Amino acid sequence: MASRSRPLRAMLQRSQPRRGGFGSPRDHEPAWIEAWNKDHRAGKDSLDWFFRAFNSTGIYEVFLKSSPRFYGFMVGGGIIGGYYWSRTWDHIWNYINRGCLYAHNPYVYPPDEDDE
């Protein structure tokens, strides 16, 4: 019975947390991936000026890093962007058709006729 209880206790006992096994952040990547990760493009890219400017705004840390804030930012940006997109095309349409639309030609009442 003692020989049975020891394996049974070993299976039921909580396992110790792993410290650096497969898939953990402390697990090393293959050498070619580590070399690839070391070769970063800071300062080499043609859009480096844009990345530096974008990173200095802090938009990523505030809005894009968290999923709920990201979705809120996308929905809010879509609503605001869609509104102004529509208003822009309305203004372009009015500019192209100025003088031809009903709103641009107000009704002028005819002069009153005197029946005297």
Image (cartoon, grey):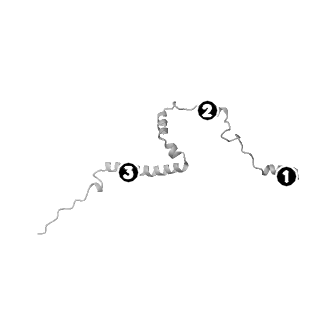
| First reached walking from the N terminus: tag 1 or tag 2 | 1
Q: CA distance from mark 1 to mark 3?
A: 77 Å
User: Residue 88 placed where, x, y %?
Assistant: 37, 48
Give the residue type at disc 2. Trp
Q: CA distance from mark 1 to mark 2?
A: 50 Å
| First reached walking from the N terminus: tag 2 or tag 3 | 2
Q: Residue at x 79, y 50 (%)?
A: 11
Res. 28 mark: none
Quadrant the C terminus occupies: bottom left
79 vs 55, nearest the viewer: 55
Q: Residue at x 29, y 50 (%)?
A: 98
Res. 36 mark: 2
**Circle 2 sits in a helix, a strand or a loop, which is it?**
helix
Give the residue type at disc 1. Ser
Give the residue type at disc 3. Arg
User: Residue 67 placed where, x, y %?
Assistant: 55, 49
- The residue tagged 1 is 5
- The residue tagged 3 is 87
Q: Nearer the viewer, mark 1 or mark 2?
A: 1
**Circle 3 sits in a helix, a strand or a loop, which is it?**
helix
User: Residue 19 placed where, x, y %?
Assistant: 70, 41
Q: Residue at x 49, y 43 (%)?
A: 59
**Circle 1 sits in a helix, a strand or a loop, which is it?**
helix
85 lies left or right of 10: left
Q: Nearer the viewer, mark 1 or mark 3?
A: 1
Whether 63 is drawn above or below 114: the answer is above
Q: Residue at x 49, y 33 (%)?
A: 48
